[in-house]
Amino acid sequence: MAVATEAEPRPAPPARRRGSAPYGWLKPGILLGAFVPVASMVQRAASGGLGANPIAEVENELGLAALIFLVAATACTPFRRLFGWTWPVRIRRELGLIAFFYALTHFLTYLVLDQFFDWGAIAADILKRPFITVGFTALVLLTPLAITSTNSWVKRLGFKRWQRLHWLLYPAVALAAVHFIWRVKADIRQPLTYALILAALLAVRLVLYLRKRYAAGETLS
């Protein structure tokens, strides 16, 4: 799942200069790191370290992993624009797809292990706890982004339409943050921290977008 980009197509990566940092390890490293939360949960499950309610613990940790990778994917373009770094955009797609994987697994854990496909109980749960609806809506918005994350889909849709579709990332991450805040019953400092980070990243993207529109207007005038 790629993150929505600027108005112009992504430029070709610059030619590597002598002494520049190699980037070949980035994607394998990200993919390897993506399985750390899963490995940790498996290890603790085997040793009985998931607490009195292991299903709820797994749900919570999968959801947190999804939010962390969403934050990382959202940060890629601001980091490139603010600091001139090129490496974040090289892993943006992988970060987004990993976030979607954890979000989907988070939902399936609730659907299969927690509720056992009990649709009546699920409907009652949705009415009682609206954060479920908010979280599911975020997952629905992320799904077309994951499906169309490949270069072939960019060509099939055309860059402009592909870009407009991937603006769904922003309501998705906002809903994911709200889902996390509403899900926590007591200490909301952790979800608020992630929400503030996401708000800052989205504010940076908005400022950069408005500056670009203003500069384009000055050029035309």
Image (spheres, rainbow, N blue to C red):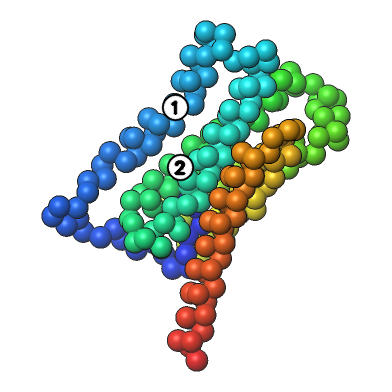
**Is 17 positioned to the left or the right of 160 in the image?**
left
Give residue 64's position: percent from left, percent from top. Answer: 58, 34
Q: Residue 36 or 171: which is nearer the viewer?
A: 36
Three-letter residue code for mark 2: Leu
> In the drawing, what numbered circle is on residue 208?
none
Residue 179 vertical placement versus 49 (above, below): below
Q: Is residue 100 above or below residue 80?
A: above
Q: Which residue corresponds to the image point at 58% horizontal and 29% vertical from the top-left?
A: 62
For label 1, the SS is: loop
Horizontal side of residue 133 vs 40, given as left or right: right
Foreground residue, 71 or 157?
71
Q: Is residue 2 left or right of residue 127?
A: left
3D distance between C-alphas at marks 2 and 1: 12 Å
Q: Residue furthest left?
A: 18
The label on residue 95 is 2
Q: Residue at x 51, y 84 (%)?
A: 217
Q: Residue at x 44, y 57 (%)?
A: 77
Task: Write the residue at 61% across / 38% down.
Answer: 190
- Secondary element at image label 2: helix
**Residue 168 position in % (x across, y down):** 61, 54
Name the residue that disc number 1 marks: 35
Q: Residues within 10 Å of mark 2 (few under 14, many from 20)?
A: many
The 10 Å Cα crowd at callout 1, few under 14, some 14 to 19, many 20 or more, is few
Q: Position of residue 173 (x, y in %)?
A: 61, 48
Q: Classify 52 as above or below 179.
A: above
From where the camera sits, is residue 161 visible? Answer: no
Residue 58 in view (yes/no): yes
